[in-house]
């Protein structure tokens, strides 16, 4: 299984221009060094230790290979355990370099604990009637043109509510809820993983530029309606940090432009998005290291231009 | 009148439509038949504008044919995951004409508030048909609309197409079941080797049916003999 994962990783990096290798390498090195310095502080190490299982939970909920693993192996929990352990290695390394041994043991035990929860509390919501799905009332409030959001809420509603609840509950801490909302934005990015049919794409008969503009504005509006109340709660708790809330909102909105333009740059009718993982990783790293954020902004603009070209094939007659 | 003039369509080096000329009278139901791989779906995709012809023109009343006039039912119907039938239909606008969903669904009896994943193949086809009819356009391209439909729905679709004809709509429909086409169409066009090889009026559908069967028999007889010899 690890061999398959390595081949997948190799495939997703294959064909990446040399410049992006340098960018990714530098970003990873910066991130590692930055975290190493910050984790001298025990409180920060504690936050990283709490964030690690949260990230693993998101990853687990987002991954689409559960059925494949169940078919492939009689004991899929072993695959989860191995993979999640591998993913915690950088955190373990940082904790050991900073000699935070208690937290090291906690993170070391995390994958096993997580897999135990996963295997005992397996939750499948796929084929329940929508009225019985979690957050049915909330989902029904989402305007129908935001069908990705309706679909996404049915798939990941619990995860988003946990993030949102934590962001509100931890708003008394500096910065923590801003990062939690950033993780939530990332989860919502998963809503854009499916390419809609040509029939849906052509529903409004708009040319590519108008289509993208309408989509981006509408989805930024949904995101703002969701995120701004939590940002306001943060500003009430930390009035001096009002500018951080505004910067965060801008970062979240740029993330949505990033996700939507990436979706349509790679769009194929009726197909799941492929080849997006590297780009999303860059956005993720840049969100954690704010001074790198111009990179995703640049990528979003580039993908916006590519999306316009790609959509010409499917929408151009409407111009 | 819809006029296709010297239309050439190729995928790489594979030529699918070759200098195709086709005139379609509006306000009628047109059938399009041809053996597998004859280019029926490519022709419909070209009419809708998904496939660009390398040369030739598509015109309607001397103006370029526009996607705005067309509603297209594709062969394979894909629905976005984890949305309900009602939500799917809400994505499409009915334009100026009112579309009373409850009246339409009285014909098709779909569980519109359930997730589309729970629908059977036939139900999915009916949902796709509803979304196409909701668009209320002048021209309907229906690629294999009968696939997956039961006898009742097939009859309902025939009645609906009769009504569209009365409203002056133009329908182009393909089907692998020749009898269904013969029962609903005013004209059937035979696509062969990338060209319209013939157009048949209602009284002459039997001769086209016989021609198609004869062609298949001639093509397959030798190969079948080879297998069983």
Image (cartoon, coloured by chain):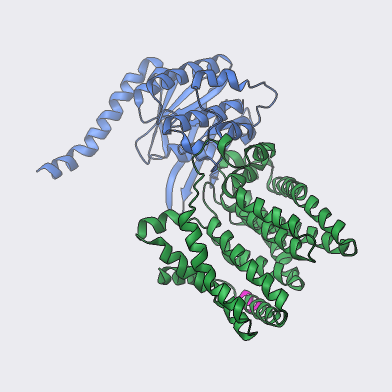
Chain colours: A green, B blue
Front one among A145 and B15? A145
Q: Looking at the image, which residue is at 41% across and 56% down?
A: A68
Image coords of residue A219 (percent x, y)? 72, 48
Picture quadrant where residue A106 is located: bottom right
Magenta stretch prevailing secondary structure: helix
Outermost residue toward the front? A102
Q: Is residue A226 above or below residue A205?
A: below
Residue found 59% across the figure and 73% down from its top: A17
Magenta run includes residue A21: yes
Answer whether residue A12 is magenta in the image. Answer: no
Quarter of the image where one finds residue B70 = top right
B168 or B1, nearer to the observer: B168
A38 over B8 or under it: above or below: below
The residue positioned farthest toward the left in the image shown = B229
**Can the viewer see residue B163?**
yes
Quick check: B13 above or below A297?
above
Q: Can the viewer see residue A304? A: no
- Which residue is at the front of the view, B136 or B122? B122
Residue segment shown in magenta? A18-23
Name the spot of residue A105 as percent of width and height, x first. Answer: 56, 76
Query: Where in the figure is residue B79, as x and y percent of width and height?
Result: 53, 40
- Residue extending farthest to the right is A240
Image quadrant where one finds the C terminus of chain A: top right
Residue displayed at 62% across by 38% down: A136
The count of marks equals 0
**Left or right: B2 in relation to B187:** right
Task: Name the quarter where the N terminus of chain A is drawn.
Answer: bottom left
Q: Position of residue A288 (x, y in %)?
A: 70, 70
Q: Which residue is drawn at the image coordinates 78% and 66% (left, top)?
A: A175
């Amino acid at each position: 299984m690890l061999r398959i994962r390595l081949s997948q990783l190799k495939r997703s990096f294959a064909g990446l221009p040399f410049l992006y290798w340098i960018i990714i390498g530098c970003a990873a090195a910066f991130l590692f060094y930055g975290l190493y310095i910050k984790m001298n502080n025990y409180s920060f190490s504690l936050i990283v230790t709490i964030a690690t299982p949260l990230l693993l939970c998101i990853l687990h909920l987002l991954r689409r290979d559960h059925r494949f693993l169940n078919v492939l192996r009689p004991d899929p929990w072993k695959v989860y355990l191995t993979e999640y352990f591998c993913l915690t290695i950088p955190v373990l390394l940082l904790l050991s370099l900073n000699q935070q041994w208690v937290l090291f043991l906690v993170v070391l035990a995390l994958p096993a604990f997580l897999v135990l929860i996963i295997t005992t509390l397996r939750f499948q919501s796929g084929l329940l009637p929508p009225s019985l799905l979690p957050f049915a009332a909330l989902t029904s409030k989402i305007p129908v043109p935001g069908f990705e959001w309706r679909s996404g809420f049915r798939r990941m509603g619990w995860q988003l509510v946990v993030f949102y609840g934590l962001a509100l509950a931890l708003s008394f801490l500096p910065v923590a809820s801003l990062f939690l909302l950033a993780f939530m934005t990332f989860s919502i990015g998963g809503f854009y993983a499916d390419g809609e049919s040509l029939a849906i794409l052509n529903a409004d008969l708009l040319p590519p530029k108008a289509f993208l503009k309408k989509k981006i504005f509408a989805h930024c509006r949904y995101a703002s309606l969701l995120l701004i109340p939590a940002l306001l709660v943060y500003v009430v708790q930390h009035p001096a940090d009002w500018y951080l809330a505004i910067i965060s909102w801008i970062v979240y909105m740029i993330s949505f432009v990033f996700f939507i333009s990436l979706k349509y740059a790679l769009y194929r009718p009726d197909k799941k998005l492929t080849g997006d993982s590297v780009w999303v990783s860059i956005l993720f790293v840049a969100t954690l290291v704010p001074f790198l954020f111009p990179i995703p902004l640049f990528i979003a603009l580039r993908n916006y231009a590519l999306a316009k070209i790609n959509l010409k094939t499917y929408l151009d007659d409407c111009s | 009148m819809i006029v296709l003039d010297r239309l050439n369509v190729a995928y790489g080096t594979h030529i699918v439509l070759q200098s195709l000329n086709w005139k379609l009278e509006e306000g009628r139901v047109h059938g399009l038949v041809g053996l597998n791989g004859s280019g029926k779906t490519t022709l419909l995709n070209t009419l809708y504008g998904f496939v660009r012809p390398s040369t030739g023109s598509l015109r309607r009343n001397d103006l370029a044919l526009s996607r705005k006039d067309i509603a297209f039912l594709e062969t394979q119907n894909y629905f976005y995951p984890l949305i309900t039938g009602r939500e799917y239909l809400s994505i499409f606008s009915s334009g100026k004409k009112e579309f009373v969903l409850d009246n339409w669904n009285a014909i098709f009896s779909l569980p519109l508030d359930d997730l589309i994943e729970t629908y059977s193949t036939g139900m999915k086809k009916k949902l796709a048909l509803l979304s196409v009819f909701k668009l209320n356009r002048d021209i309907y391209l229906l690629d294999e609309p009968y696939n997956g439909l039961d006898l009742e729905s097939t009859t309902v679709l025939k009645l609906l197409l009769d009504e569209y004809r009365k409203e002056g709509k133009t329908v182009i429909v393909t089907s692998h079941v020749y009898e269904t086409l013969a029962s609903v169409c005013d004209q059937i066009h035979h696509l062969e080797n990338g060209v319209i090889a013939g157009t048949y009026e209602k009284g002459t559908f039997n001769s086209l049916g016989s021609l198609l069967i004869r062609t298949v028999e001639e093509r397959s007889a030798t190969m079948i003999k080879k297998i069983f010899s």
